[in-house]
Amino acid sequence: MSRQRSAISLLALLWASTASAQQPLRTYADAFIQQSRRTDPQLSYTITVRGGDRSAYFVELRIANPPNPARLVIPNWAPGAYRLMDSGQNIAALTAATTAGDTLPVTRDSDISWIVDTKGAASVVVRYSAGLRNPVQWRRPNNRWFLRATSGIIDGPRTYMYLDGWKLAPAHVTFRLPTGWRIATGLVATTDSTTYWAPSYDVLIDSPVLVGHFLDYRFTAGGRPHRAVVDLGGVRPRAAPAFVDMVRRVSETTIGIFGSAPYKDYTYIFVAGRGGGLEHLNSTTIGVTEDVLARRPAGAEGVSAHEFFHTWNVKRIRPVELGPFDYERPVRTLNLWVSEGVTDYYTEVILARSGLNRVADFTRRMGDAIGNHRGNAARLVVSPERASWTVWDSPEVNNSYTISYYLQGQLLGFLLDLAIRDSTDNAKSLDDVMRYLYDHYAGERGFTRDDLRTAIRTAAGPDFQDFWRRYVSGTTEIPWDDYLKTAGWSVRFVEQAAVDARVGSITPAVQGGRWRAVAIPGSAAAAAGLVTGDELVRINGREILDGSDVSAVVRGVRAGGAVVLQIVRGGQPVTIRFTAGTYSQMRAALTDLPEQTDRMRRIRAGLVTGN
Ligand SMILES: [Zn+2]
């Protein structure tokens, strides 16, 4: 909230304090640049979708008062998706000129950067196109960066270059779109309906823009305007009232945890495609299907709650390393288990507290998570901090043991909530820690591991030194019942025979690349030669676009069935065949202790109601 508010008042101040110009001003961006008396670079972008051309977004970047030389960079990664993305290869036809039209020399500095010799010009214009060379990839709406007949999403990190040294400078962006196309974005609107403003480059690229034809629903939550826009790419069913109600309830419940919303307005952008989403400062992009939109809103409730909780946890409460960003190289932190995993814990909390899920759903899903954790040998090898730190690396750095910091953090969140409630007789909870973190680490500076422990001690009382050593930095087996009993549960582990066609998957090494296999120790696939890190092409003929294809095809295999894995290893195609056997699958369920005390009931109710 403070960031955007101060941005608007700065704008008003500049507007009010400037002198009259000597010629009529045509656009808001012209006005801003011409009237400003500052000698700092002034940046304004124009993004054009040309007539019937859907091959790329055409970008024009005007820089008044440019430094010489002026180095321009397209980010190598996008916050929230901790993967390099070879973004330089999406840029074509880059030119630079003076405003009088004289061409300026440009040299390519690296895969992602260009240097313009401005020859001392007072103002320069840089033009380039940003699009995917592979038209199939470009049409895949799951990219969250796409352009098609009736709509597109302008993804900031892959579209806007920054001026090196000036990422903190404000910028305008104007959209030139086909007739009838509309705009939905979290950027600050100006008096010109086609021009928006961002207080810095970080905010500019953290505000995806949906352009084109889309459905538009509005509601209020926490006293602030919210918007859910939906683009199914030509298919235009109405969103069920239950869908919009689901999004509203997620918003209200989450705002209730923190007490107020940290933004002026919020935009949910739903686009056709597979599940999953990406968090942004005051917006999110989420993949939905027509079925989910029209009939089955529960299919999007988990991802909606997760991405919306990120509005606080990671977009504002952030690990110290995550901002201001270095977009040229990977940025490591120990604390993704907090940013992603605790967000997954709160996803369950929000769905229970909003009434979208029943208490029994919460209990079942936490049991499932404990079962998944216990069934993964990597839990005793790779700590949550280690899993966070090595997100950019090949699994080989952990001897090919892989475990998700989402899962680890979800369970650590649950344990911390239980332990804090236990030691304070339910007077304090993880909610108090999140509010404390928001009050102290949502501004200029992010949190460190030590800050996190201090926050828990200050906001909630207990010192978690041992807890940290064992379960956060360490890989000690978690004594579940010691924690669960405070809410009247114990965990029951059951091993049951299941079909062993097990193939795990992890995200591509480079965004847009192939998903990679995880060879689960002891699995039939590992025995047949599958190695963690192999790139997945097809399994039993099904093309693997992401992890959901892997689980779908693996689920469909019967005992004794043939499995054919087509993979790429070291650049070479390899085929691996095996026959599915059986194995002992670890399952877990939370069960009620025989004697339930009032205290247990209060603590359990506290988890799922917030009271
Ligand atoms: Zn997330």
Image: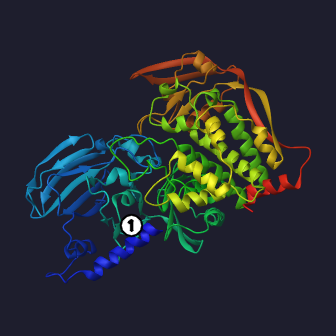
The local crowd at label 1, few if under 14, some if 14 to 19, many if 20 or more residues have their Cα within 10 Å, is some
Q: Is residue 390 above or below residue 57?
A: above
Residue with the most extreme right position: 595
* Res. 123 in view: yes
What residue do we see at 79% from left, 50% from top?
A: 360
- Please indicate whether residue 319 sits to the left or right of residue 463 in the image: left
- Please indicate whether residue 398 sits to the left or right of residue 79 in the image: right
Picture quadrant where residue 163 is located: bottom left
Q: Residue tagged by mark 1?
A: 181
Count the marks: 1
* Res. 297 in view: no
Give x and y (percent) for residue 368.
Answer: 72, 40
| Residue nearest the observer in this picture, 195 or 168 | 168
Give x and y (percent) for residue 373.
Answer: 67, 34
| Residue nearest the observer in this picture, 272 or 398 | 398
| Residue nearest the observer in this picture, 22 or 454 | 454
Q: Is residue 498 above or below residue 510?
A: above
What residue do we see at 49% from left, 59% from top?
A: 442
Q: What is the basis of the colouring in this image? A: rainbow
Q: Kindly identify the amino acid type of the residue bearing the numbered disc 1.
A: Trp
Q: Is residue 278 above or below residue 376?
A: below
Q: Confirm if mark 1 falls within 8 A of ligand 1.
A: no
Picture quadrant where residue 375 is located: top right
Question: Could you tell me which secondary element the residue under label 1 belongs to?
Answer: loop
- Please indicate whether residue 551 sits to the left or right of residue 324 in the image: right
Give x and y (percent) for residue 279.
Answer: 50, 54
- Please indicate whether residue 300 sits to the left or right of residue 417 in the image: left
Q: What quarter of the picture does the C terminus occupy?
A: bottom right
Give x and y (percent) for residue 225.
Answer: 53, 73
